[in-house]
Image (spheres, grey):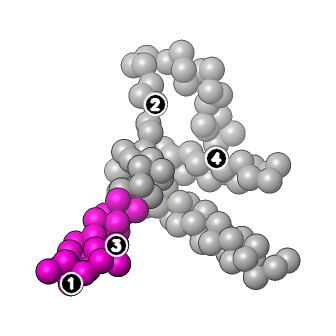
């Protein structure tokens, strides 16, 4: 395993641990049943705050329950965050060049 692969594996492990801790914390703070399923490299990782075989219910049971389940999505996708960060860095670089009087290698007098 190369250094990059090892670092990615360690980052994934830390993020997985963080997700489980957050799921536990949410369940404790708000008296909620929480289920977290991660499928990675052909293997399932499962956390459930209620230790019963019937929890969580099957997906078809959830989807046909009432009130109708709300499908949650991230507020901002990773690509939006990345493009916003890139746009911000580009704007900052442009601002720096303008303030220094240099733009595209040409001196502004």
The answer to whether residue 65 is visible is yes
Q: Is residue 11 left or right of residue 30?
A: right
Q: How far apart are marks 4 and 2 (CA)?
A: 15 Å
94 lies left or right of 11: left
- Residue 92 visible in image: no
| Badge 1 or badge 4: first in the primary sequence | 4
Out of 83 and 46, give the one closest to the viewer: 83
Q: Disc 3 marks which residue?
A: 104
Q: Where is residue 67 in the image (x, y as percent from the top left)?
A: 39, 19
Residue tagged 4: 37
In the image, is residue 107 above or below residue 11? below
Residue at the (76%, 82%) spot, across then down: 3
As measured in the structure, the alpha-carbon distance from the residue carrying label 1 to the one carrying label 2 is 49 Å
The secondary element bearing badge 1 is classed as: helix
The residue that label 1 is drawn on is 100
Mark in front: 1 vs 4: 1
From the viewer's perspective, tell me whether residue 102 is left or right of residue 58.
left
| Magenta stretch holds residue 16 | no
Q: Position of residue 62 (x, y in %)?
A: 55, 24
- Residue wearing tag 2: 71
- Identify which residue is drawn at 60% across, 21% down: 61
Circle 4: is it few (<14), some (14-19), or many (20+) Cα within 10 Å? Answer: few
Counting residues from the N terminus, which is met first, the one under dot 4 or under dot 2? Answer: 4
């Amino acid at each position: 395993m190369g250094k990059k692969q090892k670092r990615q594996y360690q980052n994934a492990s830390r993020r997985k641990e963080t997700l489980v801790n957050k799921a536990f914390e949410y369940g404790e703070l708000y008296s909620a049943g929480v289920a977290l399923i991660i499928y990675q490299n052909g293997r399932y990782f499962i956390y459930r705050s209620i230790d019963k075989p019937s929890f969580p219910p099957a997906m078809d049971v959830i989807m046909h329950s009432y009130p109708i389940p709300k499908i949650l999505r991230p507020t901002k996708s990773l690509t939006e965050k990345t493009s916003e960060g890139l746009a911000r860095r580009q704007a900052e670089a442009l601002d720096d060049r303008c303030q220094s009087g240099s733009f595209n290698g040409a001196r502004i007098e």
